[in-house]
Amino acid sequence: MIVGGLIVGLFLPLAVVWGIWLVFAVVAALPRTGGMQACRLNKDGCLIDILIPAHDEELLLPGLLSSLQAQSDGGKERMGTILVVADHCGDATAMVARSLGAMVLERSTGPRGKPAALRDGLDFLKAQTRNALLVLDADCICSANYLEKMASGLDAGHLVLQSASVLVPEDGKQKAVSPSLLAFALKDFVRPRGMARLGIPVQLFGTGMCFHPDVIRNGALYFHDHLAEDLALSHELLLRDIPAAFVCSAMIRSPLPTDAAARSMQKLRWETGQLQTWRRIPGLLARLVFLRRWRSVIALLDWSAPPLALAVFAWGILTVVVFLLMVWGMVSPWVGLVPFVTIAILAIYVFVGAMQLVTIGDIGRLVLEVPRFLGWKAALYGRMLLGRFPVRWQRTPRAAGKPVG
């Protein structure tokens, strides 16, 4: 009985997290009943400055700047300064940015990397304007209504906004549907859409983040030297009770590296950065529970959940242990149902979320690719266990030199 209770306790965190994800996916699938809900009335019509950190992005930066120039009239009316921070560049990034009408801040000294570039860019803009701030990666492309929709979110009274984001194969040749792309879309589109409808804060993605002038003036905005600077900032804003709202109608497309080594390095940086934030989770969770901010508690559980593949590996190990204990007669057969109920919750979540993105035929093809995907992730986790992971922020190498389609 004690062993059976222990097994249930080990599977319970997975069941809870995957159950939360399932609720988000179901809510996201419901018919849309209205626009973004205002949290307070603040139709101040502030301009939006755009901050773009760039390291050797002379080939992809024109795609972003062109998409900004092609914004709808409502978006152009709200566009402030476009600042490109050319961070320790060895190419013509600064010259290209100036030729396309952007202001440029060149960094050739000090620490390298996105967090430092963002800090310097923020300080520069704070000395020049008192506008809202939008952060965009240099390799992404904005939808034509992007600025207009983000401005509407600010006008509705939200202090922090996160736009929708999708990954697109950078060479345009890889199949549009893959386990990597689906996992990203579930995390950064389907779940945030469900969270937004339930009034739960969403995690910032590092690009497509927009901050009201009040957030900048009160010192709540700071970019940490962290492998997951967006997640670290999300935690700080959560503690300050400044929730980020999701704007699903404002879309940016970013390239997914098709080179295996580049894709592995990007994934290692993302997941290593997330794991490094886990040491703060108990304290954050305790404080939020004490303050009875239950929506923030749910948000933190979602943000802190282990990567999907890592959680599946943990489920597999626990399931083998349960099977061996059953064979040895140490637990009753009903305990064997626990792993299957847990994985069923995950399977339903993936299916409900995937049906909002792809066809039933695509899902069948994805199932066949899962073993190879898990093998790739297992190799990545092996590298992490051996200590071969990034220790500082670094740009993902790009194989293609054209904007994503």
Image (tube, rainbow, N blue to C red):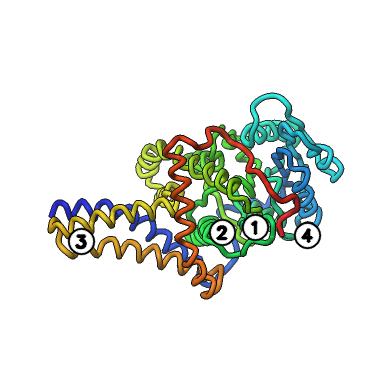
Looking at the image, tell me whether mark 3 or mark 2 is earlier in sequence order: 2
Point 46% across, 47% down: residue:
379
Residue 196 at x, y percent in the picture: 52, 58
Type of amino acid at the residue the image marks with label 2: Leu
Looking at the image, which is closer to me, 251 or 382? 382
Q: Is residue 220 left or right of residue 129?
A: left
Label 3 – label 2 distance at C-alpha? 35 Å
Q: Which residue is mark 3?
A: 335
Residue 223 coordinates in the image, percent (x, y): 59, 35
What kind of element bears circle 1?
strand
**Earlier residue among tags 2 and 4:** 4
Q: Secondary structure at mark 4?
A: loop
Q: Residue at x 59, y 60 (%)?
A: 36
Residue occupying the point 26% across, 61% down: 338
For mark 1, what is the residue?
169
Which of the labelled discs sits on residue 181, or is there none? 2
Q: Which quadrant holds the N terminus?
A: bottom left
For marks 4 and 1, the one nearer the N-term is 4
- Which marked residue is nearer to the observer: mark 3 or mark 1? 1
Q: Amino acid at mark 1?
A: Pro
